[in-house]
């Protein structure tokens, strides 16, 4: 297997694509940050708000992505596709 390097910027861009997609889908379905947060087991919308705003270098983990996909009733793969492709 070939060794592959990843830049910090590349990883940040990947996280941004995911959070932008979740935000877009959430808004298309007219779901608030608070409602989505509560649905996936959070007590407030602060984590979702910070991720959507790109603050504090926060991003979703795999379990959260799974729960978000179920809550939004979509295939989890939709989170990873850049709308700019």
Image (tube, grey):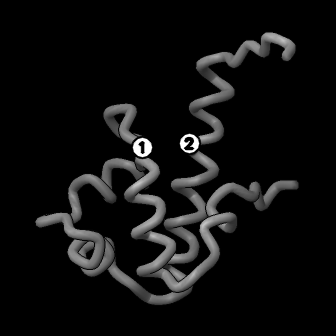
Q: Residue at the spot x=19%, y=64% of the render?
A: 42
Residue 31 left/right relative to 26: left
For residue 10, which numbered disc appears in the image?
none
Distance between the alpha carbons at the discs numbered 2 and 1: 6 Å
Quadrant position of residue 59: top left
Q: Position of residue 19 (x, y in %)?
A: 52, 54
**Number of other residues with Cα within 10 Å of mark 1, as a class: few under 14, some 14 to 19, many 20 or more:** many
- Horizontal and vertical percent position of residue 11: 61, 30
Q: Secondary structure beneath disc 1?
A: loop
Secondary structure under tag 2 reads helix
Left-right relation of 54 to 46: right
Q: Which quarter of the rendering shows the N terminus?
A: top right
Q: Residue furthest front?
A: 1
Residue 13 percent across, percent down from the top left: 64, 36
User: Which label number is shown at residue 59?
Assistant: 1
- Quarter of the image holding residue 10? top right
Q: Quadrant of the C terminus?
A: bottom right
| Residue occupying image coordinates x 24% and y 74% | 34
Q: Are marks 2 and 1 in contact (CB under 8 Å)?
A: yes
The residue lying furthest to the left in this view is 43
Lower position in the chain sequence, tag 2 or tag 1? 2
Q: Going 69% across and 18% down the picture, which residue do you hit?
A: 6
Residue ID at (52%, 65%): 22
Q: In x, y percent, where is residue 60?
A: 42, 49
Residue under label 2, please give it: 15
């Amino acid at each position: 297997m070939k060794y592959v390097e990843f830049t910090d910027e590349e990883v940040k861009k990947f996280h941004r694509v995911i959070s932008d997609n979740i935000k877009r889908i959430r808004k298309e379905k007219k779901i608030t940050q608070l409602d989505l947060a509560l649905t996936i087991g959070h007590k407030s919308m602060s984590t979702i708000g910070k991720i959507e705003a790109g603050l504090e270098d926060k991003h979703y983990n795999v379990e959260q992505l799974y729960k978000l996909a179920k809550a939004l009733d979509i295939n989890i793969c939709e989170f990873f596709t850049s709308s700019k492709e």
